[in-house]
Image (cartoon, coloured by chain):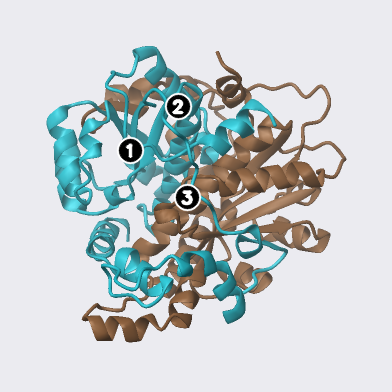
Chain colours: A brown, B cyan
């Protein structure tokens, strides 16, 4: 197994960091690696915000579902899907006039543009994750950055055609950190040849059997099985409801 | 510079492949690496379709903006944002009854769920890209998979709560392939400390100056500058219009 595969296999989502700032040269390498990621039409439809300010990190603890470890990460990176830069450039280049003179519809960014820019941002973010791992810097994605859109918009001064789609906490792995990558579901249920295979009840039961066996009869969510447990804990939880509201609000900018 | 950073720096979007099937063990390693990617709540909200069928690849040439090299890639991977599996499991687990009995709203997947699943899918895709590079297998993202939603839905038998958000072509690098990674815009315009910085006209001019200088007065798009050129070639082109239509259509499933 080569170094890269090994690094990918040993990565964990790190929520506890060595008490040490990230060296400038390491952070530069991580950012540079993110910027080397593939990007649609070489347009770089994303922006990276580098957050070190302690007060801002403490705000993010609250706005991202109350996760105190965020404030203990020496660096937080926020990845914005970003069409603002290009549309500002289009304005500067008088693209509306160009469109009128050439019989082209001038269209403002809409949902597809958000998805394409979000793709660019996430692909760049994952390059940052892998680059960080190679420097013994661990990371954790905070999906909750998609919640509380209005708050994050004001906190980061975000213009209309940007959206914070991913956030990474970064910090060196503590000494002697045990690394136990979490088990994944089996490939049979995730990877299909040629066409989609909708899972039968039997397949679903088998896929989740191990998890189902671990559900305590006195669990916090009053769930009778793993599906109910995950709905109570994740999909139906307050943070998920907030994410649905927040994204609906943000999408109003992209129509 | 370590091996991983080196690999990230030398990656190019590869559109020409050695005439050689991908070894099963290499493909397994790529898929396994994708599945080791971080995933929200360990839910793996994605599905990977492995496409080797020549007829399907030829269909994708047409549906993805007429790019013949797609059919020459020995393997194509389609990454679906996928909530179908979990919602099928929730049905199997009688989650609706659980919600009613516990005063929880039962909500079907909506826009935020699509974005979260798309994030999972893209993060996994980029792990696949990096793993492939480490095996001398090049790749190219085909964003056009977000076009022609209805066609791809039928081609891959996609149920309601899945969406094809990314596609990768894969193949070994040809022998003696020169690798010239494309230049990126400067960090000053892409990475900001703490808060967003909207670029001034001067900054926009400087950011794109090199590209602007390369625009031929007789260019195909009748553009007077780089902004007009890119709007004509990318943002305002037919494939972009189709992507906007397609994503709007697909989003009807997620409301």
In the current view of this chain or complex, which residue is farthest to the left?
Answer: B55
Instruction: Using the rendered view, name the quadrant where residue A15 is placed.
Output: top right
Image vertical order of residue A7 relative to residue B209, above or below? above
Q: Judge whether residue B35 can be spotted in this image.
A: no
Chain letter, disc 3 residue: A
Horizontal side of A192 relative to B39 (left or right) equals left
Chain letter, disc 2 residue: B
> At which x and y percent is residue B47?
35, 35
Nearer the N terminus, badge 1 or badge 2?
1
Residue drawn at x 33%, y 50% is B143
Image vertical order of residue A113 relative to residue B118, above or below? below
Q: Are marks 3 and 2 on the same chain?
A: no
Judging by the rendered image, the residue that carries numbered circle 2 is: B132
Judging by the rendered image, the residue that carries numbered circle 1 is: B15
Disc marking residue A236: 3
Q: Secondary structure at mark 2?
A: helix
Residue drawn at x 39%, y 13% is B25
Residue drawn at x 42%, y 70% is B226
Q: CA distance from mark 3 to mark 2?
A: 37 Å
Q: Judge whether residue B250 can be spotted in this image.
A: yes
Location of the C terminus of chain A (image quadrant)? bottom left
Q: Are marks 3 and 1 in contact (CB under 8 Å)?
A: no
Location of the N terminus of chain A (image quadrant)? top right
Q: Disc 3 vs disc 1: which is toward the camera?
A: 1
């Amino acid at each position: 197994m080569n170094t890269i595969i090994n690094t990918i296999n040993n990565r964990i989502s790190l929520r506890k960091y060595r008490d040490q700032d990230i060296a400038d040269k390491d952070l530069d390498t991580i950012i540079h690696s993110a910027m080397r990621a593939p990007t649609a039409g070489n347009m770089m439809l994303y922006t990276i915000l580098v957050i070190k300010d302690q007060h801002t990190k403490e705000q993010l603890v609250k706005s991202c579902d109350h996760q105190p470890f965020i404030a203990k990460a020496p660096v937080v990176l926020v990845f914005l899907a970003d069409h603002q830069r290009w549309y500002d450039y289009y304005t500067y280049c008088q693209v509306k006039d160009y469109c009128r003179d050439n019989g082209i519809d001038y269209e403002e960014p809409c949902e597809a543009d958000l998805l394409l820019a979000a793709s660019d941002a996430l692909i760049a973010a994952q390059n940052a994750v892998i680059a960080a791992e190679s420097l013994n810097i661990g990371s954790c994605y905070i999906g909750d950055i998609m919640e509380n859109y209005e708050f994050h918009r004001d906190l980061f001064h975000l213009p209309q055609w940007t959206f914070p789609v991913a956030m990474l906490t970064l910090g060196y792995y503590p000494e002697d950190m045990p690394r136990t990558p979490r088990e994944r579901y089996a490939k049979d249920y995730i990877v299909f040849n040629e066409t989609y295979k909708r899972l039968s009840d039997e397949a679903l039961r088998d896929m989740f059997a191990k998890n189902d066996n671990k559900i305590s009869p006195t669990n916090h969510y009053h769930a009778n099985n793993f599906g109910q447990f995950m709905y109570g804990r994740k999909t139906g939880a307050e943070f998920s409801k907030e994410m649905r509201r927040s994204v609906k609000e943000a999408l109003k900018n992209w129509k």
